[in-house]
Amino acid sequence: SLGAPLPTAYEAALFGVETFFAEQVREYYGPYKHSQIEAFLTKRWGKDGLAKYERMHLRKTYNISYEDSENDLASSTLRTIPVTAHCPWKYHPDDITTKAQMREECKFLRYVM
């Protein structure tokens, strides 16, 4: 036995996606406290992990238009984009895998799809 700790489902979703993005993991396997999410982000994405996560969930990051220009909150359609992805187009609709957020966060995805 290596004695290596296994990541939580949420931590695994921060590393890679195939069938579930972190938001789905949170829904299916949560609830996670906000403090736990922050700790996971720092542990797995480094000291800037929380800032990266928060940036990912602002529509203005991807120039997505607002119905209410005063609203700077995240759109429910934005995802936490992990470090890796394995065939996300097999399990997720095109409106997720081809939209501005995925293009911005996954610079090489356009060469794969």
Image (cartoon, rainbow, N blue to C red):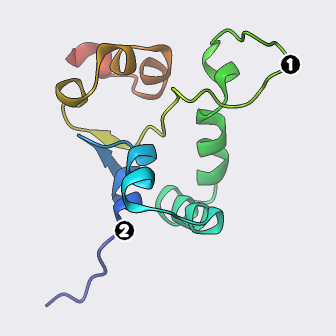
Residue 49 x, y percent position in the rendering:
59, 52
Residue 102 x, y percent position in the rendering:
42, 23
> Residue 8, labelled with which disc?
2
Residue 9 position by quadrant:
bottom left
At label 2, counting other C-alpha atoms closer than 10 Å, the crowd grade (few under 14, some 14-19, many 20 or more) is few
Residue 94 position by quadrant:
top left
Question: Do callouts 1 and 2 mark residues in contact (Cβ within 8 Å)?
Answer: no
110 relative to 56 in the view: left or right: left
> Residue 70, labelled with which disc?
1
Residue 69 x, y percent position in the rendering:
82, 12
Q: Residue furthest right?
A: 70
Whole-number angstrom distance, CA of label 1 to CA of label 2 = 36 Å
Q: Which of 77 and 12 is in front in this view?
A: 77
Q: What element carries label 1?
A: loop
61 relative to 29 in the view: left or right: right
> Residue drawn at (40%, 22%), measured in percent from left and top?
107
Q: Which of 50 and 24 is in front in this view?
A: 24
Q: What element carries label 2?
A: loop
Residue 70 position by quadrant:
top right
Say which amino acid is labelled 1. Glu
11 relative to 89 in the view: left or right: right
100 w.r.t. 39: above or below: above
4 relative to 63 in the view: left or right: left
> Residue 55, labelled with which disc?
none
Say which amino acid is labelled 2. Thr
